[in-house]
Every structure is written in structure tokens, then in C-alpha cells.
Amino acid sequence: MRVFLASIPLPGTSIVVIGAGDAAAAKARLFDGSGAKLRWFAGPAAEPDEAWITRWPEAEDLCGARLVFIALPDPTQSAFFAGLGRTSGAQVNVVDQPGLSDFHTPALIDRDGVVVGIATGGVAPVLAREVRARVEAALPQGLDRLARLAEGLRETVMATLPDFMARRRFWEAAFRGAPRDLAVEGRTAEARREMLRLLNRPEQPKGVVHLVGAGPGDPELLTLKALRALQDADLIIHDRLAPPAVLDRARRDARRIYVGKRRGEHSVPQEQIAELMIAEAKAGHRVVRLKGGDPFVFGRGGEELEAVRAAGIDVIVVPGITAALGCAAAAGIPLTHRDQAQAVSFVTAETRPGGAGPDWTSLAVPNHTLAVYMGVAGAAAVQAGLIAAGRAPDTPVAVIENGSRPDQRVLTGRLDGLARLVAREKVISPALLIVGEVAAWARSSATEQEVAA
Ligand SMILES: C[S@@+](CC[C@H](N)C(=O)[O-])C[C@H]1O[C@@H](n2cnc3c(N)ncnc32)[C@H](O)[C@@H]1O
């Protein structure tokens, strides 16, 4: 180890910043709201402002300062103030001058109560920032809430578990299990309840279910939250719409259960999926129910949420990029457009057996984009319904098969040729139909002539 990272409690600590430029401002900003006593000397030329002092510091100004940051363009002046700071007993950092500094500022990830620093001893600050970006993506935003919760319960835990190893086991379970997941989501009261439950009944850890949107298929379209949930999962319950590229991002040793439908097979009934999630969570596991797109858009996520909640299990919902958004972006179709589409509707062409289809009359209006889910088998009905309700037969349409995936196909045509296009091109599921003026923007993977040929 060539550098050592120490952490300094900031409340009440005296910090001095010297300089007037952006670098000085960045240092001053670091301590905003930290509880440190910050004095920022911006020099006599600075505009008066309550944030800084418009003179340079004297020796007595630096008395009692713990850290002094110097961000001045003049090296002689920097060296002078560095000497002054050191004589006062402070640790000095001169921005971009490692040789003049007692310490370097690491690249910091600030989650308030939890701070991560990445240091390279001042030799490669840009590399430190690169590493920070990667670590930052792996850390939930609400980590601080967990730290505060742990702080609030520390004495109770000490009193309940006097044995060091038992305490350690408790904290490990709390920081890995439901209390962590709930706290980082901001559900602090529930997280506290779970921590106390775990403290009193450590033999019965309670799991949690994450209802996670996988997006349309491109793993790069997973949200940071979805990725973290996948990487923390004990069990992943997935279906056909979760492609291998997305599952590849999950924790290697997480168990996987496929509950989708393959050709000639039946999918696992919805009640059984809910029962599975509940049983696994009750066994203390972190369950990820991975659903294509967004769990709440034509995904039956609402039913699963209801069933799991009714069993007293905590559920965390992680939204995903729904097929309409992912496919439109991949095909270069703006779903709304100032001149061509003032509204967009997400419609399903598939209904429950015997159920009513969409009300085409309200949807067959000009300048209104339709993103039609599950429309391959029903393309003829979509075409006929919209034209009968008054939509112009030459309205542009686009069919996006396997949107956002390596095998994506984008086909374009007119509404009156939609069913023919789908049949001729042997479009397979998953495919999304986009109907409306904006569909003319699609970057087609086959021209109309090729399609018609
Ligand atoms: C049961 S719905 C699930 C929708 C999903 N919850 C969402 O938000 O995208 C399945 C339908 O979504 C559409 N879909 C999902 N992923 C797709 C993709 N990658 N490309 C094209 N359509 C997709 C298709 O219309 C498919 O039949």
C-alpha cells in the first residue's frame, strides 16, 4: 500500500479554502452541509459575497484549522500559504501540486454517512475518477439511510447481543437482507421494524421480493437499480422476455427458475408464480422476479405485487424501460412530435378470452401514436378496427421485432398493409406495432419495396 486513506469526522472541524477560481469553489462545495466550519478566503479582488471573505488569510486565521486547501494560480503564493497552514498545525493540500501537499483528495463517493474514497497517491487522479464512476454505479443512493438506522440501533444491538460474534452475524444479516433493501429504498420505518425482528429472531431472516423490469432486451437498458437487484439476488424467477444477455448480468451463483412459456409448453400459472415467490421470500431469500420491459405495463406485475403483499412479504418495484420506449428509440421513431403526434397510447391487441377489445374509435385519431403490444397475431384486427373507426388507410406503421436486441428487425408500411406485412415477413414475437404519422421516421431494416417484393 503506497497511500493510506484516513477518515476525519467533519462536524465542528475547521476547514480553510484559499483561492477564487473553480477549483477553490469545488473544494468549498465538498464541505457544504457537512457540519464543518468552513472559511473561504477568495482574496481582495473577489466580488463581495457572503460565501467567502474578500482578503487573504493571516496566520491567526489558520489557527485551529484541521485542513487547508489552496487553489491559487501563483506557485510562490501557494507555497507561502502552505507554509503558513503547516505552521498553524493544519494538513495542507495544494490543488494540482502533490509535491507541496501533505495529503491528496481522493475521488469521493458521498452517501453522507457512507463515504468511499479512491486514491492513487496523486499520480493518476483521472483513473481514480474512472474507478469512482464504476463503484458509484454499484452503490445504492440511499446507503446513508442504512448507516443512520444502524447508528440509531447500535446500543440496542449491543445490549441484546453482548457477544461480539453474534453481533457481527446480526449486522451481516441486516446489511444483506430485507432491512438493507427497505432502508435504501427510503422505507426506513419498515427497515427498522425488520432489523428489530431480526435482532429478536435471528433464526428467521425474512426475505424480500424485487419486482424488476428488465427492459426490452438490451442489457445496457437495465437501470442501475435493476442491475444491483440482479447482482444481489439469491433467486431469479424469469420468463421468455428476459433474454440471456440480461440474465448474464446477474449474480453467477443465483438460482434461476424459468416460468415462461416455450413453444408447445404451458407457462407456470400466475398463482404458482406468486406462491413460489412467497415461499422463497419466507425462507429468507432475496427473490428477483424479472419481467420484460416494465413490470407494470402489460406485465401482470400488479397482480404479483398484490399477492406477495397480501402474504406479508415486502416488495420493492424496480421500473424498466417498456417495449414502446425501447423499440421506438431503437427504430428512431419519436413517439410524440410537435407537428405529428400530440398523444401516445399503449394498447394491447390481446384481451382475456371473451373480453372486450380496445375501443378503436377513441384511438383512431390523427396525430395520435399507438404502440400496440402483443399485436402479431391480432395485426389484421388492429388494421381493420382502426380503419373502420376512421383512421386513414395510408397512416404510416412500423413493426419492430426483437427491439433493442442484436436480431432486431424494423419493417415499415401503411396501415392498410399491416396484416400483410406481418404475415409476409413472418414476424415473430416479441414484436411491437407502431401506428401513426411518426412511424414514417422509422429507420427500416428492409425497404417497402423489398418487403413488397
Ligand atoms: C406481455 S407483454 C410485456 C410487456 C412488457 N412488460 C413491457 O413493458 O415492455 C409482451 C409484449 O411486449 C412487446 N415487447 C416486449 N419486448 C419487446 C421487444 N424487445 N421487441 C418488441 N416488442 C417487445 C411485444 O409486443 C410483446 O408481445
Image (tube, rainbow, N blue to C red):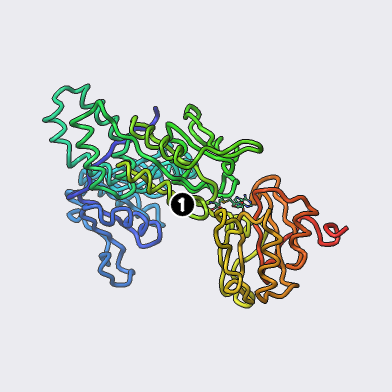
The quarter of the picture where the N terminus appears is top left
Where is 309 relative to 166, above or below?
below
* Residue nearest the observer in this picture, 281 or 263: 263
Position of 176 with respect to 256 (left or right) is left
Where is 151 relative to 52, above or below?
above
Position of 125 with respect to 447 (left or right) is left
* Horizontal and vertical percent position of residue 238: 52, 38
Which residue position is annotated with label 1? 319
The quarter of the picture where the C terminus appears is bottom right
Residue 143 figure quarter: top left
Q: Secondary structure at mark 1?
A: loop
Residue 285 figure quarter: top left
* Horizontal and vertical percent position of residue 84: 25, 49
What residue is at 39 percent from the left and 35 percent from the top? 286
- Amino acid type of the residue tagged 1 in the rendering: Pro
* Residue nearest the observer in this picture, 398 or 38: 398
